[in-house]
Image: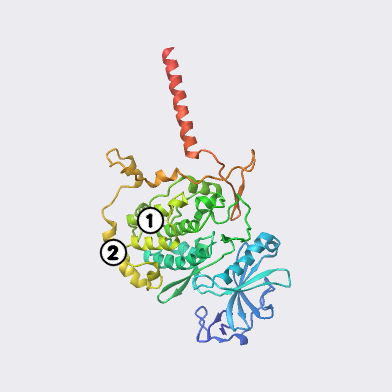
Amino acid sequence: MKSCPTCRRLYEDDAGFCPIDGVELRGATDVPPEPSAEDSRIGTVLSSRYQVRRVVADGGMGRVYESLDLVENRRVALKILHTEVARDKVALERFKREFEISKLLPHEHIVEVFDFAKLPDGGYMLVMDYLEGEELRAVLKREKTIAPERVVRMLAQLAIGLDEAHRRQLIHRDLKPDNIFLCGKHEGDLIKLLDFGSVKDKSEGAKKLTVMGTTIGSPFYMSPEQAQGLESLDARADVWALAAITYEALTGQVPFQGNNGPSILLAILTQTPKLASDVAAAANATFPIPAGLDRVLDEAFEKDPGRRIGSVGALADKVGQAYGLEGSHRDWAYTQQQTLGEQVHAKLPSLLGPPKPSRALAESDPFAAPTPQGATRAEDRTVRQPEPPARADGAFAPRASVDGLEAKIIPKGPPIGLIAAGVVALLVVVVGVVGIMLALR
């Protein structure tokens, strides 16, 4: 390995100059880490082999360091839990689970975790493959939306990795742009899926870390059954989350919005998102969205998992086909992004068709054709939601911990929309009766 004498970053032996500082690289052992007054770990060697060189990320759970594995002569990432987090037994068990799941899933599209160890100061660390690139979240913050061919290729690779996890009855449960890493390559992104610490193991005899009636995950990407903490949750929850990520990557907006955790979960349970094609058209998006994709997303956002697209592979196939691509996601995952782009943009004009009324306008049009017998609209399907769990007692419902937010699980009972409609109807009746009485006087 080589290192930059200015920034201390590590590079492969065939590199010549640091692209950050423009200086000539030297052997890593000839460029010792620069000590830091803020972090005493920098410059130390952990577990007698991992030389800590610099901080690359810091979060609520822990800190990530770029390090040199002196035994294997390779660059690795050390993810070390904050001391106060390590005292939480459940948080520590989830941290360790990330290592155990990685050992079960050695896969090109799942980040590899090499080691798990306890440190002398009482902390705990994971030793992971060091990835060059950026999270999807950073890309979306900068670019707002990304090209459909890039989305198709990303989704195809994620489907290959996740379908293998699902085959082993492992449900990720925390799919979000922050956990999708894009390693830039000449032919396009190489996708790595991060953080299996929240995984749900559906296999027989698997240890459970989640109390019934609570939820794990990020609210914007939760399926209804995950939002309610249902034990019946399966791989179709990951289908929902990937559909939400696809929607956001193409429109620049999350499909279900709210000001806080509870309001987001309520939207997921009771609302239908705007058509992605309408959102793109209203924003005059660079990449218009065909109506065929709206139908795919409607099916992926079914409240009832039994009516949802059954696997992430099937979702990836349907998204690619909505853009006119031939073949399957296993073909598109490794097709050059430029080639996919040429195919998508050649088909797109014929897929867009004439302008169409919005979903709301079409439904309010008295001259619109009736829905064929036996057919249903996406909004009609939202009424048939999965049953929420029963209340724990007469006074309190179970609570959901969502990325630091707490949200009450929706208690069993009639939907909020129906209650509101009933209240409005009652007010209309009362006003009418009062009017009649005044008229008779």
Please name whichever residue, 163 or 346, is drawn nearer the observer in this view of the structure. 163
Seen in the picture, residue 173 relative to 274 is either above or below; the reply is below
Q: Position of residue 255 (x, y in %)?
A: 44, 53
User: Which residue is rendered at x = 52% and y = 80% of the image?
Assistant: 21
Report crowding for label 2: few under 14, some 14 to 19, many 20 or more residues within 10 A (C-alpha): some
Label 2 sits on what residue type? Lys
Query: 110 or 438: nearer the eye?
Result: 110
Q: Is residue 314 toward the left or the right of residue 107 in the image? A: left
Mark 1 sits on what residue?
A: 296
**At 46% across and 34% down in the image, what residue appears?**
421
Secondary structure at numbered mark 2: helix
Vertical order, 33 against 240 (above or below)? below
Q: Mark 1 is on which residue type? A: Val
Which mark is nearer the camera, 2 or 1? 1
Secondary structure beneath disc 1? helix
| Relative side of 288 to 390, left or right | left
Residue furthest front as drawn? 204
Above or below: residue 406 compared with residue 126: above
Q: Residue 296 in the image: x percent, y percent?
A: 38, 56
Which residue bears the numbered disc 2? Answer: 347
Counting from the top left corner in percent of width and height, residue 166 is at 50, 63
Tell me: 237 left or right of 287. right
